[in-house]
Image (cartoon, coloured by chain):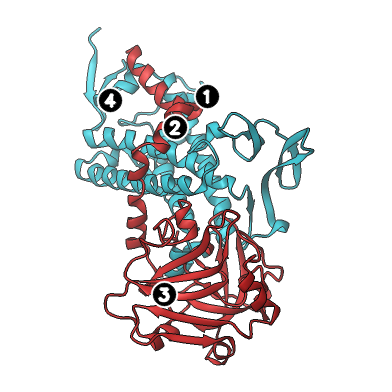
Chain colours: A red, B cyan
Amino acid sequence: MNRRLFVASSIASLGLAGCAQAKTALTTGPFRKVLDAAETVNYRVIGTRGMARLYTDADVNVQFRLNGLNTPADTLYSSLAARGFLQYELAIGGLVDRPQRFSFAQLRAMPQQTQITRLDCVEGWSQIGKWRGVPLAAILALAHPKPEARYVVFRSFNSDDQGTPFYGSLDLHEAAHPQTILALDLNDKPLDLDHGAPVRLRIPTQLGYKSTKWVSRIDVLASFAHIGAGNGGYWEDQGYEWYAGI
Amino acid sequence: MQQRQTYRHSLVARLTHWLWAVAILVLVMSGLQIFNAAPYLDASDNSNPAKRVLAIGASGTDAAPRGVTTVFGHSFSTTGVLGYTSDGLGGQAPRAFPAWATLPGPQDLADGRRWHFFFGWTLTIALAAFGVAGVLQGTLRELVLRPSDVPKLRPMLLYYLRLRKTPPAHGTYNPLQKATYTLVLFVLVPLIVLSGLALSPGVDAIAPPITALFGGRQAARLWHFTFMALLIAYFCVHMIFVFGTGAVNNLRSMVTGWYTLKDDEEVGV
């Protein structure tokens, strides 16, 4: 009988008294890999469906919160920024029938979508912003992905302190969602350098870390295994889930 | 006197009970890990310091750091317990909940989330299996409060308060137990799951009324945390009764299924 009490109290002590060694073994050992199954279930069950809630101008956070990396230190970026991004060109390549190049002026001249949506950060906080830009679906339609294409990979001008490049990806379904846009403006002003100028992704149906800032080019690919550490994005390579709808 | 035994808990009930016990432990600890990434709770949709209900932070100088917990604008010094706590790496750091209470121990939002979602599904599946088995085996009916139990709630309370010598006649579970189990299984746990889903931008796009029901995403975070605190409160009461009414008999019944009836106890229905 005492044995049962011992077992029960041992289970409780794992958390309550702080069995640090057992926790380390669980969180770094093979069982850690089993946990990844939840991401697949979330992707299948929740996925990217429906429409993110739309807000009004009165709801907007005027001082929109910053997180993650700041203004890119990249020299090409600095020279583009110094000239108001007039020389910026967005290239869409990879597995597409018609590779595209858009100047900043051409992007501005395309039909724009304005959305006042809530950005939900993986850390837990939320901010509401007024985003304006080009629906990604329109750009993909011009480029026309090939049948074997599965992912849209967003390269960025930025990299972290160690020089690891910043990037992100969506699958074609998420990329074609009507609220997934390449944003050019935030709160009625062109994006500033910290918020992702000149072009950033904005996908309100997923957490903020999927909305890649400082987009330098877009590639439509069958796999992202050869990019970075192979998990589909800078934050994904740090251990965060590729599917960030929850 | 001869001991009377009854087979109280089916195999499915016992397995799912221990499964969700583990799941809830992991969910609480990984939830505190996730909370640590934004250690404040606002009664609003987007983050709003003017609507802040709880904040757990660090202040003071580098030489003398302090943990400070602020509830409804009232600040308390909580150094070592909340705000400035053990970092799981042998030192102290600005961390809302200490490493011993979180999973993983050291700050790791990415892995905390993976633990939380895996055991969120584990809990959901365990509850569904318990519910289906309970309906098929008829054991769920013994657990749920029914209109005929309501008049017995007061005499049962008086019995617990020692203001009445005998409990009112009841089945396997007494009316207060039934009321508690009904509230926890059919109100509190569904609310925990719903308020958690309300935090997901993907779920919010599919079913906007869920997030709206809790007053927005940040408010849903506040509710999710509050429901967790209520579930821990229930767990404490549960432990008091498990250990106060014959720990060995209670634990054995949840391991083997067999429960030894006390002199005044009936077999139940």
Residue at mark 3 to residue at mark 4: CA–CA distance: 56 Å
Q: Which amino acid type corresponds to the residue marked 1 in the rendered image?
A: Leu
Q: Residue furthest left?
A: B136
Residue position for label 4: B255
Residue position for label 1: B161
Relative to residue B248, is residue A145 depicted above or below? below
Question: Which callout, 1 or 2, points to the residue nearer the camera?
Answer: 2
* Residue A126 point in image, percent of width and height: 60, 62
Question: Which callout, 4 or 1, points to the residue nearer the camera?
Answer: 4
Quarter of the rendering occupied by the C terminus of chain A: bottom left
Quarter of the rendering occupied by the N terminus of chain A: top left
* Residue B121 point in image, percent of width and height: 35, 49
Name the foreground residue: A172 vs A94. Answer: A94
Mark 1 surroundings: few (<14), some (14-19) or many (≥20) residues within 10 A: few
* Residue B61 point in image, percent of width and height: 79, 38
Res B189 label: none
Mark 2 surroundings: few (<14), some (14-19) or many (≥20) residues within 10 A: some
Residue position for label 2: A23
Q: Which amino acid type corresponds to the residue marked 2 in the rendered image?
A: Lys
Residue at mark 4 to residue at mark 2: CA–CA distance: 25 Å
Callout 3: helix, strand or loop? Answer: strand
Q: Which amino acid type corresponds to the residue marked 4 in the rendered image?
A: Val
Mark 4 surroundings: few (<14), some (14-19) or many (≥20) residues within 10 A: some
Taking the image as drawn, is residue B191 in sight? Answer: yes
